Amino acid sequence: MVKAQLEKTEALSPMNIFLHQEIHRMQKVISMVRSSLSDLQLAIDGTIIMSERLRDVLDDVYRTRVPNVWRKASWASATLGFWFTELLERSSQFTSWIYEGRPNVFWMTGFFSPKGFLTAVRQEAARAHRGWALDSVTVQNVVLMQMKEEIPAPPSDGVYIHGLFLEGAGWDRRSSKLVECTPKVLFTILPVLHIFAVNSPSVTDPSLYSCPVYKKPERTDHNYVTTVSLKTSLPSDHWVLRGVAILCDNK
């Protein structure tokens, strides 16, 4: 049914190509989980032999940890509960995208490849504007005042993204600027981020803070996604010393 629905879409569209790739990976994860749990049930009932692999899955599930074979094929998570919740949320976004159309606001955290998503945004813009070369197309952003629930429609250009967390600083929605974080508050939910492509080289604006975006709290090259520009009344060095970053997932 999913394959039939995908075939109805514009297959060669950059965003639909990205969607196909993401759903393919998601189906592999779901099939692996279903197969593991089915075999585990049979092993517990004595129908099949309890292999070492199944024993490891049983031990991890009992201790609310993500089984190693699942984690390697999917994503890192602190507990099995968080992992399963994310599985449902990711599946829900893909299902909505397939059957109800392109979302007004995307949850970038729910993608296996956030970088691939941003590349699709650039490719989409290059195709929409005659004369734009992909190599010269760069991504820019604006933080809106609205949260996801307040967005009635998608942007005319680019994409809206929600579900990002600001670490090391707070956010003033009225002035759309970085501010000092509230004491004892580790993360601040960022309003909807409008990301769009322009046909010009990336230029560093000294009045903006170039904020790195990571998939997880571990700030490694593997988790790095991109850099977004945030308005600030203070010098950028102030926020660099604070270690301010944006996280797709704060767990």
Image (tube, rainbow, N blue to C red):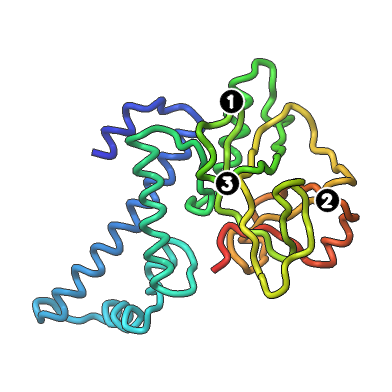
Asked whether 197 or 18 is in front, the reply is 197
Q: Which amino acid type is shown beneath numbered disc 1?
A: Ser
* Image position of 71 with respect to 214: above or below: below
Q: CA distance from mark 1 to mark 2?
A: 27 Å
At horizontal 39% and vertical 32% (from top left) the residue drawn is 101
Question: Callout 2: helix, strand or loop?
Answer: loop
Relative side of 125 to 18, left or right: right
Report the amino acid beneath label 3: Met
Q: Which residue is mark 3?
A: 147
Q: CA distance from mark 1 to mark 3?
A: 18 Å
**Residue 74: which quarter of the image?**
bottom left
> Of helix, strand and loop, which one carries label 3?
loop
Residue at numbered disc 1? 156
Q: Is residue 134 left or right of residue 10?
A: right
Q: Which residue is mark 2?
A: 232
For the point 72% across and 49% down, the residue is: 227
